[in-house]
Image (spheres, rainbow, N blue to C red):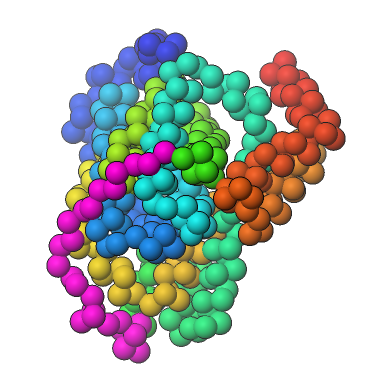
Amino acid sequence: MPKEMSAGGIKARPSSQDAVPLRAAFNARTISTGVVATLFGCTGPAIIVMNAAESGHLSNAQTVAWLFAIYVLGGLISVLFSLRYRLPISGAYTIPGAAILAASLQIIPFNEAVGAFIASGVMVLALGASGLIGRLAHWLPVPIVMAMIAGALFRFATGAVDSVVAAPWVAGTATLAFFLTGRLLRSVPPVLVAGLVGLGIALWLGQLQPADVNLGFVMPEFTAPVFSWQAFFAIAVPLTALVIGAENAQAIGVLMAEGYEPPINHMTIASGVGGILAGLLGGHNANIAGPMTAICSSEQAGADARLRYGASLINGVLFMLFGLFAGAAVPFLLALPKALIMVIAGLAMIGVLLGAFQQAFRKNGACQVGAFVALTVAMSKFSLLGISSPFWALLLGVTVSALLGELGESRAGRRSEAGA
């Protein structure tokens, strides 16, 4: 098959893609898969963002601006990449990054966090433009990054358990619906079903109080950025590691697994530009999304891999609509019982946690002790110099691996794999 090379030297798409009309990419399979990806991204993940906003004591208007930024820009990334490369590349935001912010925003003012969002976008853009992604991955072992993610997000799993204990009817029934859906209805997002079931039970028990919540449209309130070293190390550095080491890496991996050859540098550059623009609007990084790309590039989107980009187009347009009407969605979500929000957030993190643990502690994997140190530090409430635990998890994990010689073993293993 002839190759069409992008400016970065990576094949953008097979030249035969041009012969496929755009309208052919819209069929029952691609449309339904795009909707599934949207439902996944607009339920549990949106609640995780709201949980972080609540931790930082943000106003409704600031929360609306955050959702507007990440969903509109994330959707725009999906649309642009799908049309340009005819590949099922979806954009959204880093879900683990939003979860980590729930802890950071408790000690860092939001205007400084916004400055860190922009700084993270600049770093991602610089890495993409310079082609240094491979060097960064070589320097920062994936097991340590994944262990940091697992440790930082594990509290969502324990929070889900606490919610079931505190509200067994609402949270417990939602949890049961989640697992039954995963077993019986594999084409339906379990998180969506869990949310609907929990909402129905809450309505039945009278635990929703919409009269106390303004259901009118809330205009976004943008926050002027302030740059500080404290926020840079506590937020910008971990976010950059997550965008590069989790979201982009996952998206690139699943695309290659499906037989595509993605434009790696261009995907990184787009994630950097999205991070800068999202920060200016008051949201954290808008970037290439691993989970949504995985859904849209899967066989659920159809047997003809050339047409699956239609799923990402649908996903992108629906994300943009959700972001535009976030003002109406936020007051409704605030009316939900806290136990339901926490259990849905925890359930939404199961896949991310499993993947993070598996990549951090693979059998005969590299940097096992360093990854364990990163995991335990990230799970703790450790804070030093005003910088929260995710940054220290990365730093201490790498330091311990270096002291034990694990970094050298990791590099030797990579050279061996490359030679094979």
Relative image position of residue 213 (x, y in whole percent): 23, 75
Q: Quadrant of the C terminus?
A: top right
Q: Quadrant of the N terminus?
A: top left
Q: Residue, x 21% and y 59% (percent of image)?
A: 327
Q: Residue, x 23% and y 53% (percent of image)?
A: 221
Query: Does residue 79 sit above or below 72 in this rendering?
Result: above
Rendering quarter of residue 410: top right
Rendering quarter of residue 260: top left
Relative image position of residue 14 (x, y in whole percent): 37, 17
Q: Nearer the viewer, residue 92 or 392?
A: 392
In the rendered structure, the answer to whether residue 205 lies left or right of residue 413 reads: left
In the rendered structure, the answer to whether residue 71 lies left or right of residue 52 reads: left
Q: Residue, x 45% and y 29% (percent of image)?
A: 124
Q: Nearer the viewer, residue 245 or 380?
A: 380
Relative image position of residue 57 (x, y in whole percent): 38, 63
* Most frequent secondary structure within the magenta stretch: loop
Query: Does residue 160 sit above or below 87 in this rendering?
Result: below
Q: Which residue reaches farthest right?
A: 404
Relative image position of residue 416 (x, y in whole percent): 76, 20
Q: Which residue reaches farthest bottom?
A: 205
Q: Residue, x 38% and y 36% (percent of image)?
A: 118
Q: Is residue 59 at all visible to an observer of this figure? A: yes
Q: Is residue 355 at all visible to an observer of this figure? A: no
Residue 90 magenta: no
Query: Residues in magenta?
Result: 202-227
